[in-house]
């Protein structure tokens, strides 16, 4: 059976290096299996986050040969015989140890978004499938934060102070497009979440393990809603004359 | 939170081992060739009309006594502006020319000088829908040009390869124009409920169709970019008597 | 001595899956100060893995449904060993809890007329499972997570609790460490809710994540609570069997709910052979009737046709697959074939998107083009901490438990979809129970400094000794449980297993690790092993003490279900000094009006 060569980052942000490991490759093995094999055999203290091993929890985010990906979904047979497999922690968040990073910033951002706000009523909700297809796509998100990691606004420009990031634009889109939601998050998106920082270069969409069309279906529609509110004086006038109600009901 | 840009786990611009640079390079060359050609043709101010055929670069033909330059300048700002503010093109040229970022998980420019689309000039990208309105009108004229090209100068019905090519161009331009993200928002995406009223149901059907086009917006963008350039080249070649219009009957 | 940080909350909830989150929301809604502690990041708990749906008798699709039928199905599924009161509360309250989730932002799939859609599942008489494709658990946890966050619950992420403290007989707090850097933390609390989930990691093939190390069971046992029904471990019939890296990962019962067919290597649809006489009437008589049912389900129409045999209860299907393999009719990798590829590919992708991706990406199999290979995987433990039905209180004052770590609700076997509803029904009740208790308690009970020292010493010890690698010990435990207390059990095997577990205990007391306390999984496992061995031993002893087959407990030496004594008692284990004490306690008696529901059925 063939062996694979892995280079795994060991250490903290200030002190660390890529260490070499060899792992027996079994059929259907993924990178996370290889990391577990290293843990069980060579280094029980190798730090890695994981839960489900089935791409449902979004815990095992890392960068494999430079590409942000879920280790549980990255098959070892993708690599050629003898190819070196380099496993690094995600870059955008501070390293705690080895492959584990401090993603707590994301949870802080989430708190600031105004939650689901339906109008109070006691009747059964009648909502049709076509009304929620869009929302359901966004709710597939498993919060792996790969989109946050790859987003250059956070990654290269380190604008965590200004930009909420793709994950939370997706969440906001899911709230805004919910047929029963009554809140308006446009001011927030423009002035605090800074949706304008996004230049729709689509890396978030490229790395999303759930295949959510983050840019086309969440961010751009939100940008257009922000335009409705702040950058389209003509449209505002027309809507006023026609008396169109955006929320529908 | 510490800035993690200079971390030992992530030395250099990227750890990617694939040919991530190939795509932005192709885009840069592709746009470059088109822009050079279009600029040349705009200022050439010749060979844009022959018999019943009018080049899309010069249509609608705006001839005024007070205007002493190429009439193309009066009209080309519309398609140019439409494409420059298009959500797909933005992605492509931000990556290829501005390197924000050049590829996913590849560092281009870095630091905190980046402001995305929140400041002048990029804040003007929010005007995309106005360009869409104008581009849709221009497209109508191009369809008119294509249809009347089936009528020879002597009034007889004729079919030529050039006419068919003009139709193909209009078809591709339509697919591109009506798959526009801003239009997708305006025609129905802005609504949060699709099923309550007859108007919403109609909006849903339009939105659904536009969404299908929008999924391949990139393909339509490139195809129509080439077709519009080639249509012009064809007409120029016919006008310069290099090749015939290819009359079939 | 090592330092530790201290936090004070009226109630702490350990575990942030569906039950823990729901409990914390309830405590916070009742105006108390709550701390929610989880071993992973928030929103990663095992609840996200739940696929098929949440069972609630909304009667949106089958108007004949009602709580009584749900109650009866649950009790029948549990072979009448359930705590009747829990089953009743569960059936009665699940619809309200589901509607509440919707009001909090959960987006369920819809019927054509815009109501919450419900699908069929094994053991449920009517279409009852509210779902979101095959990611219902994710929808539930995200909804609860956001609701909790916006209510201002304090969350301690990646924090493991290693000890519960008592003041006299009352709970007074908990001690643990942050996984991130190993720093210690003390929680002072008036009440503690355990919602730590299950024990799957004691078996080698399991659908459970690393977190399922029996923490709640272990902590409660140490604190003096008793564990009931521990012999009832559910092996889900359909886990992935190939490739090895994904062995055990769940294939949702939703596949069968949507019309998936089970066949052996000879192409036979074998489930008909294994339908118990007592339930045969509820199932299609032949292929044609099963097909009619599936077609009606796809079209969203009502039908007189009865359900396909694949929708028998989980214990039954798991046994069938086991026997097919034993008799040489299994698939190449020791499973059977589950086929949904005869349906329209687009529909399969729409209704079972995660399954489609899971097989495509992890196993390189296109389920719209060919069958999946599936086999039994350890999935759920019906047994757990004994609680009072209405308040979720254990016998230790101030200690509450909900969700999988609590026992009683599911009896000898759990129906699919009853777990998610269990989480929200009893999560809420545990939160309310703990709040009421904390309110009447007044001040905080005290914590003995010596207990804290002992807790720190216990955690530090693996660094200061030579001993076996914790991963090796965990592997040995898996092997013992697989070999001696697996799907099919017999006395002589279990006795060997119990012996071996006693030996293993000695190793667990000696496990050692290197490195430091900063995110060190090996060190974490050292403490987890102590919890795991409690459940492993409890399962082995309880199983050995029940000389019959019932629900998920299958004995080769006692293949029949007893109608006498064993139908009327729960097995219970508790800590007695260094020993595990085993008792058989009588089932709570069902009141007459509920009994009548079953009698009416017999007529």
Image (tube, rainbow, N blue to C red):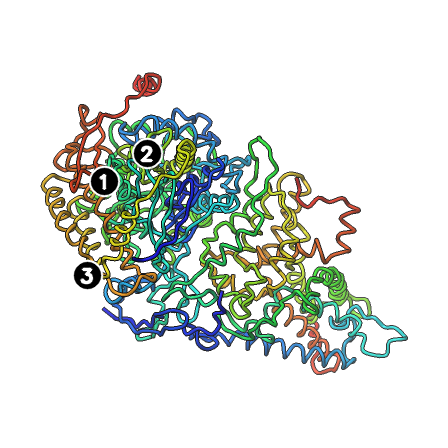
Write the residue at 67% across / 58% down: B182
Vertical arrangement, residue B23 with respect to residue A134, above or below = below
> Alpha-carbon neighbours of circle 2 within 10 Å: few (<14), some, or many (≥20)?
some
> Could you say which is closer to the camera, residue C268 or residue B241?
C268
Nearer the viewer's eye, disc 1 or disc 2?
A: 2
Residue at the far right in the pictured view: B65
Q: Quadrant of the C terminus of chain A?
A: top right
Residue C508, x across and y down, in percent: 19, 53
Q: Image quadrant of residue C285?
A: top left
Residue B217, x across and y down, in percent: 60, 62
Q: Secondary structure at mark 3?
A: loop
Instruction: Report if residue C134 is visible in the image.
Output: no
Residue tagged 3? C465
Q: Mark 1 — on which chain does it sit? A: C
Residue C250, x across and y down, in percent: 33, 48
Is B153 situated left or right of A81 in this image?
right
Residue tagged 1? C319
Task: Looking at the image, tell me whether mark 1 or mark 3 is earlier in sequence order.
Answer: 1
Task: Looking at the image, tell me whether mark 1 or mark 2 is earlier in sequence order.
Answer: 1
Task: Looking at the image, tell me whether mark 2 or mark 3 is earlier in sequence order.
Answer: 2
Estimate the spatial distance between the alpha carbons at disc 1 and disc 2, rounded to whole Å.
Answer: 40 Å
Write the residue at 34% across / 64% down: A31
Let me know if marks 2 and 3 both belong to one chain: yes
Q: Which numbered circle lies on residue A55?
A: none
Estimate the spatial distance between the alpha carbons at disc 1 and disc 3, rounded to whole Å.
Answer: 44 Å
Residue tagged 2? C397
Residue A122, x across and y down, in percent: 57, 30
Estimate the spatial distance between the alpha carbons at disc 2 and disc 3, rounded to whole Å.
Answer: 36 Å
């Amino acid at each position: 059976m063939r062996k694979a060569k892995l280079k795994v980052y060991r250490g903290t942000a200030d002190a660390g290096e890529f260490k070499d490991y060899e792992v027996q490759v079994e059929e259907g093995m993924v990178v996370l299996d290889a990391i577990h094999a290293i843990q069980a055999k060579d280094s029980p203290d190798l730090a890695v986050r994981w839960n489900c091993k089935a791409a449902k929890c979004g815990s095992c985010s890392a960068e494999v040969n430079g590409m942000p990906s879920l280790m549980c979904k990255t098959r070892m047979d993708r690599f050629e015989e003898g190819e070196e497999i380099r496993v690094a922690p995600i870059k955008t968040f501070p390293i705690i140890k080895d492959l584990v990073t401090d993603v707590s910033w994301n949870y802080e951002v989430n708190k600031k978004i105004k939650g689901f706000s339906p109008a109070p009523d006691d009747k059964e909700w009648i909502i049709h499938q076509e009304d929620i297809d869009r929302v359901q796509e966004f709710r597939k998100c498993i919060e792996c934060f790969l989109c946050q990691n790859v987003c250059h606004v956070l990654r290269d420009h380190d604008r965590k102070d200004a930009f909420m990031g793709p994950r939370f634009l997706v969440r906001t889109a899911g709230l805004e497009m919910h047929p029963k939601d009554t809140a308006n998050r446009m001011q927030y998106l423009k002035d605090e979440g800074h949706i304008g920082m996004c230049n729709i270069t689509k890396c978030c969409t490229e790395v999303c393990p759930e295949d959510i069309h983050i840019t086309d279906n969440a961010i751009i529609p939100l940008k257009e809603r922000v335009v409705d509110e702040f950058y389209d004086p003509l449209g505002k006038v027309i809507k006023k004359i026609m008396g169109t109600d955006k929320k529908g009901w | 939170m510490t800035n993690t840009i200079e971390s030992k786990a992530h030395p250099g611009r990227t750890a990617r081992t694939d040919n991530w640079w190939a795509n932005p390079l192709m885009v840069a060359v592709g746009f470059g060739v088109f822009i050079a050609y279009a600029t040349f043709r705009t200022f050439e101010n010749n060979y844009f009309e022959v018999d019943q055929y009018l080049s899309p670069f010069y249509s609608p033909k705006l001839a005024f006594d007070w205007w002493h330059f190429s009439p193309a300048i009066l009209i080309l700002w519309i398609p140019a502006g439409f494409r420059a503010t298009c959500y797909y093109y933005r992605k492509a040229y931000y990556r290829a020319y501005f390197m924000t970022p050049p590829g996913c998980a590849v560092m281009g420019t870095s630091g905190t000088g980046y402001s995305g689309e929140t400041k002048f000039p990029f804040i003007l990208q929010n005007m995309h829908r106005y360009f869409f309105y104008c581009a849709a009108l221009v497209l109508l004229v191009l369809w008119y040009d294509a249809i009347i090209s089936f009528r020879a100068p002597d009034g007889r019905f004729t079919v030529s390869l050039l006419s068919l090519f003009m139709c193909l161009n209009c078809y591709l331009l339509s697919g591109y124009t009506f798959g526009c993200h801003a239009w997708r928002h305006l025609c129905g995406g802005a609504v949060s409920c699709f099923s309550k009223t007859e108007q919403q149901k109609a909006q849903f059907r339009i939105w659904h169709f536009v969404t299908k086009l929008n999924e391949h917006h990139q393909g339509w963008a490139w195809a129509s970019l080439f077709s519009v350039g080639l249509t012009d080249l064809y007409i120029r070649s016919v006008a310069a008597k290099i090749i015939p219009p290819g009359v079939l009957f | 001595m090592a330092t530790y940080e201290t936090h004070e909350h009226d109630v702490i909830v350990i575990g942030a899956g569906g039950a823990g989150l729901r409990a914390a929301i309830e405590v916070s809604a009742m105006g108390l100060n709550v701390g929610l502690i989880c071993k992973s990041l928030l929103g990663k708990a095992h609840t996200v893995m739940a696929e098929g749906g949440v069972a609630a008798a909304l009667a949106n699709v089958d108007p004949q449904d009602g709580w009584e039928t749900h109650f009866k199905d649950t009790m029948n599924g549990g072979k009448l060993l359930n705590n009747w009161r829990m089953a009743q509360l569960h059936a009665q309250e699940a619809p309200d809890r589901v509607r509440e989730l919707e009001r909090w932002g959960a987006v369920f799939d819809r019927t054509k007329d815009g109501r919450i859609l419900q699908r069929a599942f094994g053991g449920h008489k009517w279409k009852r499972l509210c779902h979101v494709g095959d990611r219902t658990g994710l929808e539930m946890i995200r909804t609860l997570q956001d609701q909790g966050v916006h209510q201002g619950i304090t969350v301690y992420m990646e924090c493991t609790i290693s000890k519960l403290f008592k003041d006299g007989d009352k709970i007074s707090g908990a001690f643990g460490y942050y996984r991130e850097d190993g720093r210690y933390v003390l929680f002072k609390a008036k009440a503690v809710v355990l919602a730590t989930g299950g024990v799957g990691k004691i078996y080698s093939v399991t659908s459970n994540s690393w977190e399922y190390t029996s923490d709640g069971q272990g902590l409660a046992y140490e604190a003096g609570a008793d564990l009931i029904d521990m012999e009832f471990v559910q092996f889900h019939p359909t886990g992935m069997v190939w490739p090895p890296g994904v062995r055990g990962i769940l294939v949702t019962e939703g596949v069968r709910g949507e019309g998936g067919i089970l066949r052996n290597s000879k192409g036979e649809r074998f489930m008909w052979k294994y339908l118990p006489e007592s339930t045969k009437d509820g199932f299609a008589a032949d292929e044609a009737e099963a097909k009619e049912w599936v077609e009606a389900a796809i079209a969203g129409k009502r039908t007189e046709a009865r359900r396909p045999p694949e929708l028998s209860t989980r214990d039954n299907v798991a046994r069938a697959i086991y026997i097919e393999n034993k008799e040489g009719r299994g698939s190449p990798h020791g499973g059977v074939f589950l086929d949904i590829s005869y349906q329209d590919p687009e529909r399969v992708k729409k209704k079972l998107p995660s399954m489609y991706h899971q097989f495509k990406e992890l196993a390189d199999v296109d389920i719209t083009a060919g069958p999946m290979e599936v086999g039994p995987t350890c999935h759920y433990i019906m047994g757990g901490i004994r609680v009072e039905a209405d308040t979720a209180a254990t016998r230790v004052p101030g200690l509450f438990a909900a969700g999988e770590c609590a026992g009683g609700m599911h009896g000898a076997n759990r129906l699919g979809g009853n777990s998610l509803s269990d989480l929200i029904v009893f999560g809420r009740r545990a939160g309310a129970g703990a709040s009421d208790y904390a309110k009447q308690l007044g001040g905080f009970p005290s914590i003995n400094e010596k207990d804290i020292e002992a807790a720190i010493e216990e955690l530090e010890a693996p660094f200061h000794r030579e001993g076996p690698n914790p991963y090796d010990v965990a592997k040995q435990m898996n092997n013992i449980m697989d070999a001696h207390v697996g799907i099919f059990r017999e006395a002589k095997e279990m006795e060997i297993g119990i012996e071996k577990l006693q030996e293993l205990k000695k190793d667990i007391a000696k496990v050692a690790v290197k490195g430091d306390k900063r995110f060190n999984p090996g060190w974490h496992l050292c403490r987890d092993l102590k919890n795991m061995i409690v459940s492993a031993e409890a399962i082995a002893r309880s199983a050995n003490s029940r000389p019959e087959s019932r629900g998920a407990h299958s004995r080769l030496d006692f293949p029949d279900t007893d109608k006498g004594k064993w139908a009327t008692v729960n097995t219970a284990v508790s800590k007695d000094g260094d020993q595990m004490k085993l008792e058989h306690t009588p089932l709570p008696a069902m009141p007459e009006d509920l009994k009548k529901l079953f009698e009416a059925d017999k007529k």
